[in-house]
Protein backbone atom coordinates (compact mmCIF):
# COMPACT_ATOMS: atom_id res chain seq x y z
CA UNK A 1 0.00 0.00 0.00
CA UNK A 2 1.54 3.27 -1.14
CA UNK A 3 0.87 6.41 0.87
CA UNK A 4 -0.46 9.48 -0.90
CA UNK A 5 -0.85 12.31 1.56
CA UNK A 6 -2.80 15.33 0.42
CA UNK A 7 -2.37 17.21 3.68
CA UNK A 8 -0.29 20.35 3.98
CA UNK A 9 0.99 19.21 7.40
CA UNK A 10 1.83 15.51 7.08
CA UNK A 11 5.03 14.98 8.98
CA UNK A 12 7.25 13.53 6.30
CA UNK A 13 6.07 14.85 2.95
CA UNK A 14 3.75 17.62 4.08
CA UNK A 15 2.84 20.08 1.40
CA UNK A 16 4.86 18.49 -1.35
CA UNK A 17 1.94 16.72 -2.99
CA UNK A 18 -0.81 19.13 -2.15
CA UNK A 19 -1.57 20.13 -5.74
CA UNK A 20 -3.81 17.93 -7.83
CA UNK A 21 -1.27 17.43 -10.60
CA UNK A 22 1.47 16.61 -8.14
CA UNK A 23 -0.82 14.13 -6.38
CA UNK A 24 -1.63 12.43 -9.66
CA UNK A 25 2.02 12.22 -10.64
CA UNK A 26 2.97 10.84 -7.26
CA UNK A 27 0.22 8.20 -7.42
CA UNK A 28 1.31 7.18 -10.93
CA UNK A 29 4.83 6.76 -9.61
CA UNK A 30 3.60 4.62 -6.69
CA UNK A 31 1.70 2.44 -9.17
CA UNK A 32 4.71 2.13 -11.47
CA UNK A 33 6.88 1.26 -8.46
CA UNK A 34 4.66 -1.71 -7.65
CA UNK A 35 2.03 -0.54 -5.19
CA UNK A 36 -1.06 -2.76 -5.02
CA UNK A 37 -3.24 -0.14 -3.30
CA UNK A 38 -3.04 3.66 -3.07
CA UNK A 39 -3.99 5.07 0.33
CA UNK A 40 -5.18 8.67 0.15
CA UNK A 41 -5.30 10.73 3.32
CA UNK A 42 -6.47 14.30 3.78
CA UNK A 43 -6.24 14.46 7.56
CA UNK A 44 -2.86 14.27 9.28
CA UNK A 45 -2.96 11.98 12.29
CA UNK A 46 0.56 12.62 13.53
CA UNK A 47 0.82 13.32 17.25
CA UNK A 48 -0.44 16.83 17.98
CA UNK A 49 -1.77 17.47 14.45
CA UNK A 50 -4.56 20.02 13.99
CA UNK A 51 -8.12 18.82 13.36
CA UNK A 52 -9.35 19.13 9.80
CA UNK A 53 -12.95 20.05 9.02
CA UNK A 54 -15.11 17.75 6.96
CA UNK A 55 -15.33 20.22 4.08
CA UNK A 56 -11.56 20.75 4.08
CA UNK A 57 -10.95 17.01 4.01
CA UNK A 58 -13.47 16.54 1.18
CA UNK A 59 -11.87 19.38 -0.81
CA UNK A 60 -8.49 17.73 -0.47
CA UNK A 61 -9.30 14.11 -1.24
CA UNK A 62 -12.29 13.94 -3.60
CA UNK A 63 -10.67 15.66 -6.61
CA UNK A 64 -7.62 13.43 -6.18
CA UNK A 65 -9.72 10.25 -6.09
CA UNK A 66 -11.63 11.36 -9.18
CA UNK A 67 -8.40 12.12 -11.01
CA UNK A 68 -6.82 8.80 -10.03
CA UNK A 69 -9.84 6.75 -10.97
CA UNK A 70 -9.21 7.95 -14.53
CA UNK A 71 -5.45 7.60 -14.60
CA UNK A 72 -4.48 4.55 -12.53
CA UNK A 73 -5.82 1.03 -12.38
CA UNK A 74 -5.33 0.24 -8.69
CA UNK A 75 -7.69 0.04 -5.74
CA UNK A 76 -7.92 3.36 -3.91
CA UNK A 77 -8.15 3.43 -0.13
CA UNK A 78 -9.43 6.46 1.75
CA UNK A 79 -7.67 7.17 5.05
CA UNK A 80 -10.41 8.86 7.05
CA UNK A 81 -12.50 8.57 10.21
CA UNK A 82 -15.41 10.70 8.99
CA UNK A 83 -18.59 9.03 7.70
CA UNK A 84 -19.28 11.72 5.10
CA UNK A 85 -15.76 11.48 3.70
CA UNK A 86 -16.12 7.68 3.50
CA UNK A 87 -19.37 8.00 1.53
CA UNK A 88 -18.13 10.69 -0.85
CA UNK A 89 -14.80 8.96 -1.37
CA UNK A 90 -16.45 5.68 -2.30
CA UNK A 91 -18.87 7.54 -4.59
CA UNK A 92 -15.80 9.09 -6.25
CA UNK A 93 -14.14 5.68 -6.78
CA UNK A 94 -12.45 4.51 -3.56
CA UNK A 95 -12.95 0.81 -2.77
CA UNK A 96 -11.41 0.64 0.69
CA UNK A 97 -11.80 2.56 3.95
CA UNK A 98 -8.69 2.88 6.14
CA UNK A 99 -9.85 4.20 9.50
CA UNK A 100 -7.34 4.84 12.29
CA UNK A 101 -10.33 5.11 14.66
CA UNK A 102 -11.67 1.69 13.61
CA UNK A 103 -15.15 3.02 12.68
CA UNK A 104 -15.81 4.38 16.18
CA UNK A 105 -16.74 7.94 15.13
CA UNK A 106 -20.39 8.88 14.80
CA UNK A 107 -22.07 7.16 11.86
CA UNK A 108 -18.80 5.67 10.56
CA UNK A 109 -19.82 2.06 11.17
CA UNK A 110 -23.18 2.60 9.49
CA UNK A 111 -21.47 4.29 6.55
CA UNK A 112 -19.10 1.35 6.12
CA UNK A 113 -21.94 -1.18 6.39
CA UNK A 114 -23.89 0.65 3.71
CA UNK A 115 -20.91 1.04 1.38
CA UNK A 116 -19.91 -2.63 1.41
CA UNK A 117 -16.21 -1.97 0.76
CA UNK A 118 -13.08 -3.36 2.45
CA UNK A 119 -12.32 -1.72 5.80
CA UNK A 120 -9.07 -1.53 7.74
CA UNK A 121 -9.66 -1.29 11.49
CA UNK A 122 -6.69 0.21 13.33
CA UNK A 123 -5.93 0.24 17.04
CA UNK A 124 -5.21 3.56 18.72
CA UNK A 125 -4.99 4.31 22.43
CA UNK A 126 -6.21 7.85 23.13
CA UNK A 127 -6.46 10.44 20.37
CA UNK A 128 -3.73 11.98 18.16
CA UNK A 129 -3.41 15.23 20.11
CA UNK A 130 -2.54 13.48 23.39
CA UNK A 131 -1.92 9.80 22.61
CA UNK A 132 1.85 9.85 23.14
CA UNK A 133 1.62 11.42 26.61
CA UNK A 134 1.71 8.22 28.68
CA UNK A 135 0.45 5.09 26.90
CA UNK A 136 -0.33 2.23 29.31
CA UNK A 137 -1.04 -1.45 28.66
CA UNK A 138 -1.18 -4.62 30.72
CA UNK A 139 0.34 -6.41 27.72
CA UNK A 140 0.45 -4.32 24.58
CA UNK A 141 0.12 -7.27 22.18
CA UNK A 142 -2.75 -8.92 24.01
CA UNK A 143 -4.55 -5.61 24.63
CA UNK A 144 -4.30 -4.58 20.97
CA UNK A 145 -5.39 -8.04 19.80
CA UNK A 146 -8.38 -8.00 22.17
CA UNK A 147 -9.44 -4.54 20.95
CA UNK A 148 -9.20 -5.53 17.29
CA UNK A 149 -11.07 -8.77 17.93
CA UNK A 150 -13.88 -6.88 19.68
CA UNK A 151 -14.05 -4.23 16.97
CA UNK A 152 -14.11 -6.83 14.19
CA UNK A 153 -16.91 -8.70 15.99
CA UNK A 154 -18.93 -5.46 16.32
CA UNK A 155 -18.42 -4.69 12.64
CA UNK A 156 -19.54 -8.18 11.62
CA UNK A 157 -22.53 -7.91 13.94
CA UNK A 158 -23.43 -4.58 12.32
CA UNK A 159 -23.36 -6.16 8.86
CA UNK A 160 -19.84 -5.90 7.46
CA UNK A 161 -18.80 -9.16 5.80
CA UNK A 162 -15.89 -10.82 7.58
CA UNK A 163 -14.05 -11.10 4.23
CA UNK A 164 -13.98 -7.29 4.01
CA UNK A 165 -12.16 -6.72 7.31
CA UNK A 166 -8.42 -6.03 7.71
CA UNK A 167 -6.80 -5.32 11.08
CA UNK A 168 -3.87 -3.07 11.99
CA UNK A 169 -2.10 -2.75 15.36
CA UNK A 170 -1.55 0.98 14.80
CA UNK A 171 2.17 1.44 15.30
CA UNK A 172 2.87 4.79 16.94
CA UNK A 173 -0.73 5.47 17.88
CA UNK A 174 -0.63 5.66 21.67
CA UNK A 175 2.41 3.40 22.04
CA UNK A 176 5.90 4.01 23.38
CA UNK A 177 8.89 3.02 21.26
CA UNK A 178 9.38 -0.05 23.44
CA UNK A 179 5.71 -1.00 23.03
CA UNK A 180 5.98 -0.63 19.24
CA UNK A 181 8.98 -2.95 19.14
CA UNK A 182 7.22 -5.45 21.40
CA UNK A 183 4.15 -5.40 19.13
CA UNK A 184 6.29 -5.99 16.06
CA UNK A 185 8.11 -8.86 17.76
CA UNK A 186 4.77 -10.46 18.71
CA UNK A 187 2.85 -9.56 15.56
CA UNK A 188 1.94 -13.20 14.98
CA UNK A 189 -0.45 -12.96 17.92
CA UNK A 190 -2.77 -10.87 15.71
CA UNK A 191 -3.13 -13.80 13.36
CA UNK A 192 -5.11 -15.64 16.02
CA UNK A 193 -8.03 -13.45 14.89
CA UNK A 194 -7.90 -15.00 11.42
CA UNK A 195 -8.00 -11.67 9.59
CA UNK A 196 -5.45 -10.10 7.23
CA UNK A 197 -2.98 -7.83 9.02
CA UNK A 198 -1.86 -4.43 7.72
CA UNK A 199 1.16 -2.70 9.21
CA UNK A 200 2.31 0.91 8.98
CA UNK A 201 5.80 1.65 10.24
CA UNK A 202 7.18 3.64 7.30
CA UNK A 203 9.40 6.51 8.52
CA UNK A 204 7.80 6.44 11.96
CA UNK A 205 9.49 7.88 15.03
CA UNK A 206 10.23 4.50 16.61
CA UNK A 207 12.52 3.88 13.64
CA UNK A 208 14.11 7.26 14.31
CA UNK A 209 14.61 6.24 17.91
CA UNK A 210 16.20 2.94 16.91
CA UNK A 211 18.47 4.36 14.21
CA UNK A 212 19.10 7.91 15.35
CA UNK A 213 17.90 9.15 11.92
CA UNK A 214 15.65 12.05 11.00
CA UNK A 215 12.41 11.39 9.17
CA UNK A 216 13.90 11.84 5.67
CA UNK A 217 16.66 9.39 6.44
CA UNK A 218 14.65 6.41 7.65
CA UNK A 219 14.42 4.36 4.45
CA UNK A 220 16.71 1.52 5.59
CA UNK A 221 14.91 1.31 8.92
CA UNK A 222 11.53 1.37 7.17
CA UNK A 223 12.54 -1.43 4.82
CA UNK A 224 13.77 -3.55 7.72
CA UNK A 225 10.49 -2.94 9.55
CA UNK A 226 8.44 -3.93 6.49
CA UNK A 227 10.44 -7.13 6.04
CA UNK A 228 10.12 -8.06 9.72
CA UNK A 229 6.37 -7.34 9.61
CA UNK A 230 5.87 -9.57 6.57
CA UNK A 231 8.04 -12.33 8.04
CA UNK A 232 5.78 -12.08 11.10
CA UNK A 233 2.60 -12.48 9.10
CA UNK A 234 1.61 -9.04 7.80
CA UNK A 235 -0.18 -9.24 4.43
CA UNK A 236 -0.11 -5.54 3.64
CA UNK A 237 2.46 -2.88 4.51
CA UNK A 238 1.63 0.81 4.24
CA UNK A 239 4.73 2.64 3.01
CA UNK A 240 6.03 5.85 1.47
CA UNK A 241 8.90 4.22 -0.45
CA UNK A 242 7.17 1.64 -2.60
CA UNK A 243 9.92 0.80 -5.07
CA UNK A 244 12.53 -0.05 -2.46
CA UNK A 245 10.03 -1.87 -0.23
CA UNK A 246 8.70 -4.00 -3.09
CA UNK A 247 12.23 -5.19 -3.87
CA UNK A 248 12.85 -6.08 -0.24
CA UNK A 249 9.52 -7.90 0.00
CA UNK A 250 10.24 -9.91 -3.14
CA UNK A 251 13.21 -11.36 -1.26
CA UNK A 252 11.15 -11.96 1.89
CA UNK A 253 8.32 -13.55 -0.12
CA UNK A 254 10.69 -15.92 -1.89
CA UNK A 255 11.92 -17.15 1.47
CA UNK A 256 8.40 -17.38 2.89
CA UNK A 257 7.14 -19.35 -0.11
CA UNK A 258 9.71 -22.09 0.59
CA UNK A 259 8.59 -22.24 4.21
CA UNK A 260 5.00 -22.75 3.07
CA UNK A 261 5.88 -25.75 0.87
CA UNK A 262 7.14 -27.75 3.87
C1 LIG B 1 -1.23 4.47 9.75
C2 LIG B 1 -2.37 4.80 9.03
C3 LIG B 1 -1.02 3.12 10.13
C4 LIG B 1 -3.08 2.62 9.00
C5 LIG B 1 -1.23 6.58 9.40
C6 LIG B 1 1.91 7.87 9.33
C7 LIG B 1 0.80 8.34 10.17
N1 LIG B 1 -3.29 3.89 8.65
N2 LIG B 1 -2.36 6.14 8.81
N3 LIG B 1 -1.99 2.23 9.72
N4 LIG B 1 -0.52 5.61 9.96
N5 LIG B 1 -3.96 1.68 8.64
O1 LIG B 1 1.78 7.48 8.18
O2 LIG B 1 3.04 7.91 9.88
O3 LIG B 1 -0.06 2.75 10.81
S1 LIG B 1 -0.81 8.27 9.39
Image (cartoon, grey):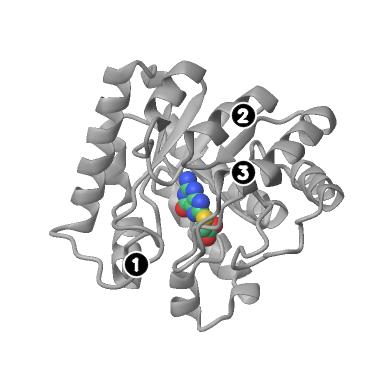
Residue denoted by label 1: 130
Task: Check if mark 1's residue and mark 2's residue have beta carbons within 8 Å.
Answer: no
Label 2 vs label 3, nearer the camera: 3
Q: Residue 45 at x, y = what percent?
A: 49, 58
If the image is split into quadrants, where does the C terminus sit? top left
- Assess disc 2: are there few (<14), some (14-19) or many (≥20) residues with their C-alpha within 10 Å of its C-alpha: some
Dot 1 or dot 2: first in sequence order is 2
User: Which label sits on residue 88?
Assistant: 2
Q: Quadrant of residue 79?
A: top right
Residue at 32%, 25% in the rendered image: 155
Q: Residue 27 at x, y = what percent?
A: 76, 45
Q: Residue 73 at x, y = what percent?
A: 77, 28
Query: Can residue 46 be seen at all in this image of the molecule?
Result: yes
Q: Residue 126 at x, y = what percent?
A: 30, 58
Q: Secondary structure at mark 2?
A: helix
Label 3 vs label 1, nearer the camera: 3
Amino acid sequence: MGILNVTPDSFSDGGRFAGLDAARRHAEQLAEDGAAIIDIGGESTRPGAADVSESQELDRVIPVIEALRESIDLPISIDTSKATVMREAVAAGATMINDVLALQEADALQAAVGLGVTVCLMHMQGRPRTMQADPQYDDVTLDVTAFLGDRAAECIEAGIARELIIIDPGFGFGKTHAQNVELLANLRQLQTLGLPVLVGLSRKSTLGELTGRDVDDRLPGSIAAAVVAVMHGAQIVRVHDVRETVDALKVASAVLSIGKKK
